[in-house]
Amino acid sequence: MKNIYFPEEDIVEDDLFYICFMLEKVARFVKKPTSYIVKQIGEKNLYHLLSCAQALHCDNPEKVAREWVNDYAIQEGNFICDEKYDAIDTGKRDSKNILEQLKNDEDYVQGILRYFCK
């Protein structure tokens, strides 16, 4: 998958992991299921976020989570998250599962949408 802003650069597995981690972090922050967060952000914005992941990961995750809540009009809920695993471990698991389940013609965004919004 190519970066939409720098077409000569590939979006790599670490970028997918970071986005999965942040999706989980935002979901826990607002107490909503990850599927809601993915749907609220939308396909076009997921391409944007994956393309910016290398820069975003340098920022404080709490700050990025708050920005996503504001930027994508994410509403607070009362969903109880399974605290058995932290957001990093959950992000690793999710990105690994997405990679394993990618179909030949899918990119990371399509994999994210199919995985979280089944």
Image: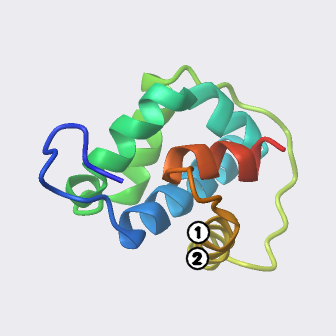
* Residue 36 seen in the figure: yes
| Viewer-proximal residue among 111 and 40 | 111
Relative image position of residue 40 (x, y in whole percent): 62, 26
SS at badge 1: helix
Which of the 4 quarters of the picture holds residue 36?
A: top right
Amino acid type indicated by mark 1: Ser
- In the image, 88 versus 115, the foreground residue is 115
Disc number placed over residue 22 in the picture, else none:
none
Identify the residue at horizontal 58%, vertical 47% (top origin): 26
Residue that carries the numbered disc 2 in the rendered image: 92
Dots 2, 1 in contact, CB < 8 A? yes
Tell me: residue 115, above or below residue 57.
Answer: above
Specify whether 112 is left or right of 3.
right
Q: Which amino acid does label 2 sit on?
A: Lys
Residue underneath mark 1: 95
Residue 32 point in image, percent of width and height: 76, 41
Query: Tag 1: Cα neighbours inside 10 Å, few (<14), some, or many (≥20)?
Result: many
Q: Is 7 situated above or below 1?
A: above
In the picture, which quadrant includes the C terminus? top right
Q: Is residue 34 visible?
A: no
The quarter of the rendered structure image containing the N terminus is bottom left
Residue 91 is situated, as x and y percent measured from the top left of the image, at 59, 69
